[in-house]
Each structure stands twice: as C-alpha cells, then as structure tokens.
Image (cartoon, grey):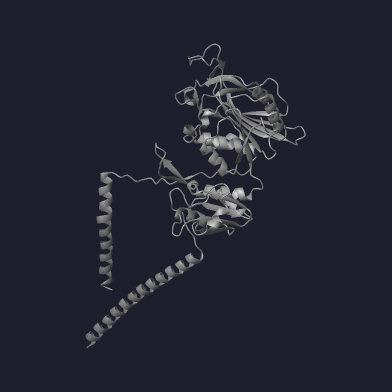
Amino acid sequence: MKRLNLMKIKAKLDESKRLKHGGYAILVTLLFLGLLVVVNLLAEEFPVKFDLTGNKLFSLSDQTLRILKGLDQEVTIYGLYENGEEDQWVRQVIDTYQRKSNKIQYKTIDPLRNPGFVKQYEKEGTISSGSLIVVSGDKYKVINSYDLINFQYNQYGYPTGAESLVVERQITGALLYLSAEKNPVVYALRGHGEASLNYEILKQLRNENFEFKDLNLLTAETVPEDADLLLVYEPKRDLTSAEAGKIRAFLQNNGRALFLMDLQGEDYPNFQSLFASYGVALRQAIVVEGDSQRHVGNRFWLLPNLKEHKITDSLRSRELEMLLPVAQVIEETPLKKQTVTIEPLLTSTEKAWAKVDMTSGIVEKEPADLTGPFTMAVAVTDRAVDGATESRLVLVGNTNFLSGEIVTQVPGNLNFILNCFNWLDDREENLEIRPKSLYTPRLFISGFQTLLYTALFVVVIPLLIFGSGLVVWLRRRHL
C-alpha cells in the first residue's frame, strides 16, 4: 500500500514537472509574440529604415543633409506619373528627403488628367511623364525624367541599360536653385568661330544652376549687366580691338572670365594684349613630356601636375588625374601690375620640352625648342588697391581635354572645368554629389566551393538541427 502511494506521489510529481516546464514554454512563447507585436507597433509609430544597398542608393549625402537642415522654406515636389506608373526608386529617395525634413512635401500628378497643371511649367519646353517639378513660392525647377538616371549606350547610340542613379544630385541641385537669391549667368562669346561646350559638361553646369546665354560683342555695346561670367571657348579668329576693350572694361568692374584657347598656329594680337593686362601670354609652342610617368604613351598627351589651388584641391584629395592632349605653353609677362596674382594650375615636369616649330616632324628635343617645366593653365586674380573689386580669370592653353570622348572617360577633366566655373563665381556651396552606380557585383564561386556549401547547408546544418532536437527530446522525456 505504501509502495502504491509512493508511486502515485512520484507520478504526480512527474506530471507537475511536465506541467511546469510546459507552462514555462507557453509563457515564453506568449512573451515573445507580445514583444513582436510591440516592436511592430513602435516601428509603425517611429519608422526607422536601413539602407542595405551596396552603393547606398537611398541614403543622403552629408551635403544634402546640411542643406535640408538649413531649409527655411516650404518645398513641394510634384511627380508626373500616370496612374500606377510611379518610379519606386525615385519615390524611395524622395521619402528619405521627407523623413529628414518637414519642409519637403511630395505629390503625384497624372499629366494626362491634369494637362493644365503641367502647362504652367512648360515655359522651356514640353515636360515628359516621369519628370519631377520642384516648387517653392514663385520659383520652380523641372527635372526631366531622362536626367534622373544615367544610361549606358551602345555603339549606335541606343540605351542598353541603367548605369547610375542621379535623383539625389538633381533634387539637391533644385533645392540650391530655389534657395539662391540669384543664379549665375554665363555669356558665351560668339562671332569668332567659337565651339560649344560638350553636352555632358553643359548638363552638369545646368545641374549646378548656371544659366547660359550667347553674346556677340560686334553688335552688343557692352557685356550685359547681368553677366556673372564670360566664357571664351576655342575661338578660330582674333578679337577686334573694340571687342577686347569691352571685355577689358567688364573685367575691370569685378568681372570674371574663362578662356579656353586651342593651338591655332598663329598669334592673336588682341587676345594677347588682353592677357598681357593680367601678366600672362600664350606661347605658340606644343608641350612634349619627357617623363614616362606623366604621359599616356603619346608624349603630347600629358598627365599634368596639379598645383595647389581651390580649383584643383578636390582633384588632389581624391587623386583624380587629368589628361591634356596637345597643350600649349602659358608664360608670365616680364611686367605686370602689383595688384595681380598669378597661380599655376596645371604644369609639366622639368623633363618636358616645347616644340616651337609647328611643322617639324621630329618629336625629340631640338636646339630651338624650349626647356621645361611649363605651365598650361593659370588662375589670375586682380585685386583693386582699395579692395572694392576683384577681377578673376582662368586661362587654359588647351581645349581637347573637354572633347566628348575624353571628358566622359577622365573624371578629373570634368571636375576641373566644373571647379573653374565655381571658383570664378565665388561659390561657397558646390554640388558635390556624384551619381550612384546601379552596378551589382556578382559572386563567383568554384566547383569545389559549390560542393562545400551544398554539403554544409543540405547535410551538415540539417543534421546538427536534428541532433540538437534529439538531445533535447531525450533529456525532456526523463523529466
């Protein structure tokens, strides 16, 4: 009888232990489920998102965050999308702007159903579906759909796929445009066979809110008052003395100018007279680089040294090389005003020489050739004695470095010309945001690695899980 009672007591104790452990398991499960519910509610109330893309496609740069922090005006971004056609990449970037600033609002507009709304912003041309319109007060900026993504093109000029995302660059550029009291106006000189800037360069400069107009000084009495910068790009003929006088008057009145001069094989006396006013001169001589580390196989195709200056500082810090094909020499004149400061930007090495005879077929140095080092680009500042005005000009003895084939393949060339414009305009806030690559690197593994990972995930890990479950079951069955 006692033995029977002992067995009943033991059975009740065993049952009590099982109930106790089962109760613990149920309680832990309920607590875990409750925690998940609380976390989800908090996540909805305080949305925190993490950008896990390799290229940080949906993260904002420090520059954008700084601009958003200082934003003191309401900005509305209108996305022109037909019903159900909204671009989710673009939307995610805009959502990030909204999370960082309560000054940013976003609305979608169907251009087919609201043609009158779109019409009021079509002053500079038709706006396509997929474009963005960034508006603040009476100012606005249109970002065309084809400017939000960079595409790769085949040899026939047809797009083959998306290459990089430029949504942040475009929207932040629009914010800078809307917040600026006045955007810089660039007048490009015409009437001497001048070339036009490459489309890629113009697009980047317009992204940075430079406005471009043409100027013919043969008909205009002066450089217009709204001109912030004068561009002279690859003239094929000399100025007249009257034109040179108009440019000189513009520069003396706090004017800024960028001269990009190609080698023409003849001297331009009126251009040279203008340059001499600022202590510099173009020399009809082609630079040949003798240092094998500072050219690209062709000794006329130079990898110039970047001298210390605000224009070149970002290139130096990022170790961006430049390529100058067939550059001419810039020299300082024996006499110059005391108020003038001349700073070299691009130079050759001491091993370089310059060919004076343009018709010579000999690359090696000849007795008449000049001895290096040489300067191929300079920045000139003329500060008035009373400090009331400051004229600036940049002179580059080369234009080939801006050709379409080179400027798109050599990042240093594009950055250099953008920096020239920004320095001439005294810009404190330059648009430094670069396109974000959409390239996704692929993981390549060998046949042995494939077998190894297959064994690990198909055999080893399942066996470990089964074994651990078996051990737990064997231990619990004796509780």
Name, please, the residue furthest toward the bottom: 1
Q: Residue 360 in the image: x percent, y percent?
A: 50, 14
Would you place residue 151 above or below residue 385 in this image? below
Q: Quadrant of residue 237?
A: top right
- Is 320 above or below relative to 327? below
Q: Position of residue 376 (x, y in %)?
A: 57, 26
Is residue 373 toward the left or the right of residue 112 in the image? right
The residue sitting at 73% across, 36% down in the picture is 389
**Quadrant in the picture for residue 187:** top right
305 left or right of 1? right
Residue sticking out furthest to the right = 386
Q: Quadrant of the N terminus?
A: bottom left
Question: Which one is nearer the viewer's eye here, 18 or 463?
Answer: 463
Question: Can residue 279 be seen from the camera position used here?
Answer: no
Residue 473: where, in percent of width, then height? 26, 69
> What residue appears at the point 54 percent right and 11 percent down from the top-left corner?
367
Q: Locate the C terminus and report the quarter of the image it occupies.
A: bottom left
Which is more toward the observer, 390 or 275? 275
Side of 324 relative to 183 (left or right) = left
Q: Is residue 256 visible?
A: yes
Q: x and y percent of residue 88 in the render? A: 45, 55
Q: Is residue 6 above or below residue 206?
A: below
